[in-house]
Amino acid sequence: MANALEAASLVMIPSGYEDGTLGSLKPTDGTGDFTFSRGSNISATRINEQGYIEKGYENLLTYSNTFSDATWGKSSVSVTSGQSGYDGTNDASLLEATSTTAARLQRSTGATGVATLSFFGKAGTTDWVRLNGGNSSVWFDLSNGTIGTLQSYNLIDYSIDSVSGAGGWYRCVIVTDAPSFFRIYPANSDGGVAIIGDSIYIQDAMLNQGLVAYPYIETTTAPVAGGILEDEPRIDFSDGCGHLLLEPSRTNLIPYSEYNFASTNGTIDYNNALSPEGYTNAIKFTSTGTAPHIRIGANQSVSNATISAFVKYGNKQWVQFMLSSVNTLYANFDIQNGVVGDTGASTSNAKIEDYGNGWYRISATFSYIGSTSARIYLVADGSANWASPSSVSGDYIYTYGWQAEQDTTYPTSYIPTYGVSQTRLADKTDRGSNLAYTGNYTLFMEFEYSDSSFQILNQNVATNHNLLIQNDDTYFTFRSTGAQVNFLNTFDWSANSGNNIKMAFYKQGINAKMFVNGTEYTPTTNTLSTGDEVLDWRYLNFSITAGRQEQLKVKQLVEFQTALSDSECIALTTI
């Protein structure tokens, strides 16, 4: 392989990347780099190097640490910047009461859906601070990191965490639904207000969607995003090593994927346990009676949808995923051992995937058209049908991250939602045409894909330059400027959906061969008539016709300006 790579004209192994660009290892002058576009800073996720789901998120507060700016209203307080902060800078501010009349620093947020407010604080002449999100307030003791009085209307969660090594600094957090304000009040006592001269130190305020406070991001005139950005290539580590995750556009129809659930004969405890994200934003669902279940809070219009959710064993081994109350729309899962149990007649593609730390993602495709609610029951065993889920009081599981994708047959990566449905646009790559060349060549790819026909490499015209797989027809085709090479009923693509594939295709004059996982295949149809077709592969997994873009996990892509020998191709593609 090493010798072969030395002869390559392009080598792309997902590693170096930045927002909008995936770099190739060869050539080194940037001419082989892929540009990326996708859209939306909060709809895409990946599995990071630590094995956790990584999201995109935003600090929605402008001037998040410029408290003297006019966007922050001052009511009976003064703000003095240039104070020593928790991070070793002089970017903190002193907030001091100048009157006893509701002394506070404030601003409107316009936030909708579940959101988290946070700031860093330190005791000054007083120990107490009140953080208010409109209809929810919490008093925090900045001298010892304890929580005081709660005013809980839409309050979901709250916390105060010491900043290690920062000398008395804490991060104060409240989670609430649709916070209309962000207000910080110095206070003279728990549940009280400030008197003249009461002061605290503050730094780095943040408002982000979701149930937890994400790492702080500085803003000035506009919100700023962190985590997975809209045009960032997703180097995904779901199999332990990095691959480029390319997916079609999908929509999560469930408006609240982590919150606003309903239950029958059970209790819901939000932010109870570490989720697959690595944050404490998973739900604990506990049975209180017969046929307990947790469900999305409102019916959703779905059509032949694939439903998925993350679940973790508590003390109940079996759960049942059900769509509506129809006796054919269910699937049972053993979430202690990762096994699919009984499924209904109108349910297909039931799947359970290990996400580590005891978490599984369960999914199934339901043949149903209408408005309904997805739900998870605690059941007796894997053979229990839809009508007989049974449990005893005290049985419990954990869950997180629900998703409904319409007119699909498999789940794509998690799309978080915070009050409305969310669409992740397709991952689009474009290498440009500057590496085009004529003559003999070899293309090598290592990848994994998940479903039926799609272009794995193409130009932007359906009749020019594409490699197409149709696993439902056990079909592979190579097309270049109108000439085609077809391999029909050779390698069984359908049977290998979801498996690792190493594939090489070479053109030598008017001859062509394909090698897949160490096996050589000759064409069933070959209309090559010249040795001078131009090699001009611009896109990876780019849809140029309907239904021709599915999930693709690219591990490496190599181009050679020569036809490698059969033995070299076999060595390259042997698993």
Image (cartoon, rainbow, N blue to C red):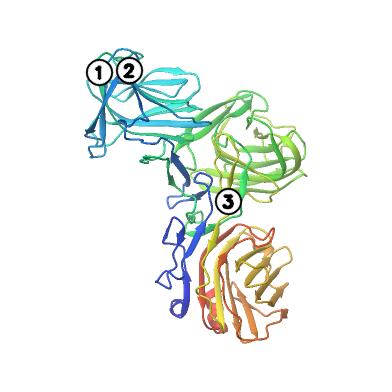
Residues at discs 1 and 2 in contact (Cβ within 8 Å): yes
Residue 575 can be seen, yes or no: no
Q: Residue at x 35, y 41 (%)?
A: 218
Looking at the image, is 266 positioned above or below residue 335? above
Picture coordinates of residue 175 (x, y %)?
A: 46, 28
- Could you say which quadrant of the image residue 374 lies in? top right
Q: Name the foreground residue: 325 vs 553.
A: 553
Looking at the image, is 477 positioned above or below residue 310? below
For mark 1, what is the residue? 198
Q: Would residue 467 be found to the left or right of residue 474 on screen?
A: left
Q: Name the foreground residue: 377 vs 48.
A: 48
- Could you say which quadrant of the image residue 132 lies in? top left
Q: Nearer the viewer, mark 3 or mark 2?
A: 2
The secondary element bearing badge 1 is classed as loop
Precedes in sequence: disc 3 or disc 2? 2
Precedes in sequence: disc 1 or disc 2? 2
For mark 3, what is the residue? 425
Residue density around tag 1, few if under 14, some if 14–19, many if 20 or more, within 10 Å: many
Q: Amino acid at mark 1?
A: Asp
User: What whole-number distance in Å separates the C-alpha atoms at marks 1 and 2?
Assistant: 10 Å
Residue density around tag 3, few if under 14, some if 14–19, many if 20 or more, within 10 Å: some
- Could you say which quadrant of the image residue 448 lies in? bottom right
Q: On residue 103, which mark appears?
A: 2
Q: Name the foreground residue: 555 vs 540.
A: 540
User: What whole-number distance in Å separates the C-alpha atoms at marks 3 and 1?
Assistant: 50 Å
Residue density around tag 2, few if under 14, some if 14–19, many if 20 or more, within 10 Å: many
Q: Name the foreground residue: 355 vs 371.
A: 371
User: Which residue appears farthest toward the front when viewing the image?
Assistant: 70
